[in-house]
Amino acid sequence: MSQNDNDIVIVSAVRTPFSKFDSLMADIPSIDLGVMAIKEAISRAGVKPEEVDEVNYGSCIPAETALETDIPGRQATLLAGFPAESISLSLDRACCTSLTTLRLSIRAIRAGEADISLSVGSENMPRTPHLAPGLRTGKRLGPIQLIDNLFELGYGAKGFRPVAVDAGEVALEHGVTREMQDAWALGSQEKYAKAFASGKIRVGEELMPVVIPRKKGDPITIDKDESPRKTSMEALAKLKPVYGSPTVTAGNAPPISAGASAILVMTRKKAKERGLTPLATVIAAIASATAPREIAVIPAYSIRKALAKAGLKLDQMDIIEINEAFAAMPLVSTKILADNDEKKWKELQAKTNVNGGAIAIGHPVGASAGRITMTMAYELRRRGGGYGVASICGGLAQGEAVIIKV
């Protein structure tokens, strides 16, 4: 595809490290993590806050942002030094959120409503409070009920099943066994460890440090993802499934994390005017959805929809990112994309999540879609260029996908 001045390009992409459940990052409000990513993203591009026409900000555990009375996008932009006149949008599309924000930023530029737009996703899942419904009207007798908003992610409140149950059952229906999912999880850990050791995942590219001040002593700096760990097939096999799922365990699912990501986009013409070298060109960005139970297959559907929109073939994609909400997702979706051809399935697996995924890195849900996009962009740059497609599932089988060229 030839370049033109109206292309939408990524000029800056950064994320914080993703935390463990019980780390020091667990006490940082997601809004503050978002502020860090916002400041770093525009600083790297030499863009001033007042030059950003629109900020689309995603966060999808409202119980946590409610501790600061919500509107996280507006709060984060003001705290990041943006002028009072700045335009921001806070939104929630489950795990898809920070690809939805990117798609909306792209849409604003194409519509002529913005020249420069910032896509942000931030989450602090460990900080999610317990909820105590009914206390406002008082409780005369009996125990107070507390609800854990993280347990099953609350889907049972309206009669939906835990996504781990849906994913596990659908995986088995597609011939993806528990052992296959454990093997993928082990591979995710091993690929990440290799990528980190080789310097691929480092501050200055994908990562920025999180600096935590202390009342006494030097500040604490977190400059790498906290969740990656060594494991084995034997250790993974001993873990019991969660929430009644037939296959999903704590070992083949990602850890509960905190983190933020930010991606700055503009037209190629604007990047030239500012002397910026694009990290990637966005070829297509789409949204999708299907029957709520089909969460493990929605990345495949999303990828096909994006390819059709771009007029490209799957074989043209040099790398693929499919978020590891569970190991079932990349396995089921690549099998569907391979049309159940075993040889093709193995080929697709080999180019999917080549540096590991959320099982190793963590999955702060509002930030993860941005993370897979920038992980893919930086890897393509290291390879000298090419096409990549990233896709993510969201609660009750929502999907997003993006195709980029470097």
Image (cartoon, grey):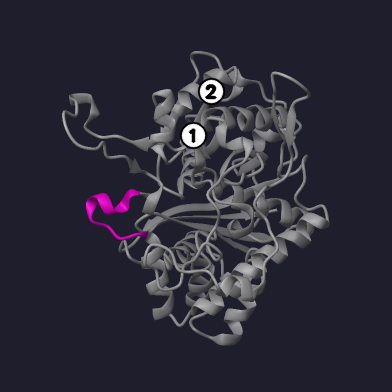
- The location of residue 7, given as percent across then percent down, is 60, 44
Seen as rendered, the residue at the extreme bottom is 342
Upstream in sequence: badge 1 or badge 2: 1
For the record, the magenta segment spans 154-162
- Specify the label residue 371 is tagged with: none
The residue pinned by badge 1 equals 57
Q: Tell me which amino acid carries mark 2.
A: Thr
Quadrant of image for the N terminus = bottom right
The front one of 192 and 347 is 192
Relative side of 129 to 257, left or right: left
In this picture, is 87 found above or below 363? Answer: above
CA separation in Å, label 1 and label 2 = 9 Å
- The location of residue 144, given as percent across then percent down, is 26, 36
Identify the residue at horizontal 77%, vertical 46% (top origin).
202
- Specify the label residue 77 is tagged with: 2
- Tell me whether circle 1 and circle 2 mark residues in contact (CB < 8 Å): yes
- The location of residue 141, given as percent across then percent down, is 16, 32
- The location of residue 166, given as percent across then percent down, is 36, 67
Quick check: is 40 in the magenta stretch?
Answer: no
Relative side of 75 to 13, left or right: left
The local crowd at label 2, few if under 14, some if 14 to 19, many if 20 or more residues have their Cα within 10 Å, is many
Identify the residue at horizontal 49%, vertical 80% (top origin).
177
Q: Secondary structure at mark 1?
A: strand
Q: Secondary structure at mark 2?
A: helix
Seen as rendered, the residue at the extreme top is 84
Q: Tell me which amino acid carries mark 1.
A: Tyr
Question: Residue 238 is drawn in which quadrant?
Answer: bottom right
In this picture, is 235 found above or below 66? Answer: below
Asked whether residue 87 appears in the rendered view, the answer is no
